[in-house]
Amino acid sequence: MSGMLTVIGEALVDLVQRPDQEAQAHPGGSPMNVAVGVSRLGHPVNFIGRWGQDAHGQMIEAHLRASQVQLPVAADGRPTSTAKALIGPSGAADYDFQIDWSLEAAQPQLEQILTQTSALHVGSIGAMVEPGASSVLEAVKAAAPQALISYDPNCRPSITPDAYQARQQAEAIVAHSDLVKASDEDLLWLYPNRTLEESAQAWLELGASMVVVTRGELGPWALTRKTSPDGIALPAYRVEVADTVGAGDSLMAALLAALLDRGIEGRKARAEIELLSREELKDILTFATVAAGITVSREGANPPGREELNRVLFPQEG
């Protein structure tokens, strides 16, 4: 059994609008989805975010507790953040956010929580929007000497339209990260004058040990110093797409779970990632790609549990 993964970032309610249908409310937020995904895959998780005591906040808390995510910080009296998600014909979502993000309520406990953390995941709005973003970066710096650090920028230009500023904030976290996952859209927005391969290589040089780039239907591509410059690519797991909500978060959660399965956490995580063979990296990517595929086959951010994922990966044992 692994140590404790702590996830810090936003929790919100996705108000999902499909063509010719009434809007449906689902718990969401990229870091929260990652916390749920890792917990469903069998590893203990603390989630540190913020939500209100309103109906949306109660939905978020019930969702987290149903997946056995531990909640060291209670709800506050402010409104819960929301994201209106408009689902297009392809299943892709466009978002309109109403965000209230800070870590004020968590500060008294955060230092103690980080001392007990062997892996820390951050990203998305929580790592970009102030006043909470500065606290997230400080948490990363505090945890980096003794924990696996993972990061997913999950850029939202509608919230953080200044690409230069977003790039500075992303690079500040990448410099302390062991595992970074980004979509092709993230990298092309942050670095419009680079190829995806150039951006991934630059993040390795900045400090990351492993960079995974998701490319939609083309599937993920991973780069480490050991596999540079070609990296390792896998095709996407083919399913009938219901929507893409939470797909990248499920992939991120499964990447983390696959590392934790192998005992890659704590102060030795960076060195152990860099020692992974091509075959081990392929196995990790396969695990994550199938998790993402299962998620896009159904509505909303609903990542698979361990048994469900194993039934797809190892059907002969079912």
Image (tube, helix red, strand yellow):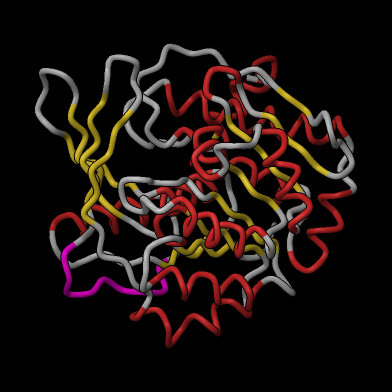
Decide: is 279 above or below 97. above
- Nearest the eye: 165 or 251: 165
Residue 69: % across, % down:
44, 58
Residue at 31 percent across and 66 percent down: it is: 101
Magenta region: which residues? 71-79
Residue 67: % across, % down:
42, 50
Considering the image in quadrants, where does the C terminus appear? Answer: top right
For this orientation, the residue located farthest to the front is 193
- Nearest the eye: 190 or 104: 190
Decide: is 291 above or below 106. above
Residue at 58 percent across and 48 percent down: it is: 42
Q: How many marks?
A: 0
Q: Relative to residue 152, is residue 296 drawn left or right?
A: left
Residue at 19 percent across and 40 percent down: it is: 15
What kind of secondary structure does the magenta stretch mostly adopt?
loop
Question: Would residue 77 be counted in the magenta stretch?
Answer: yes
Q: Relative to residue 217, is residue 62 drawn left or right?
A: left
Residue at 40 percent across and 79 percent down: it is: 106
Considering the image in quadrants, where does the N terminus appear? Answer: bottom right
For this orientation, the residue located farthest to the bottom is 108
Residue 203: % across, % down:
70, 50
Question: Would residue 93 be counted in the magenta stretch?
Answer: no
Answer with the quarter of the image where residue 22 lies. top left
Residue 221: % across, % down:
69, 30
Decide: is 126 above or below 306. below
Answer with the quarter of the image where residue 246 lies. top left
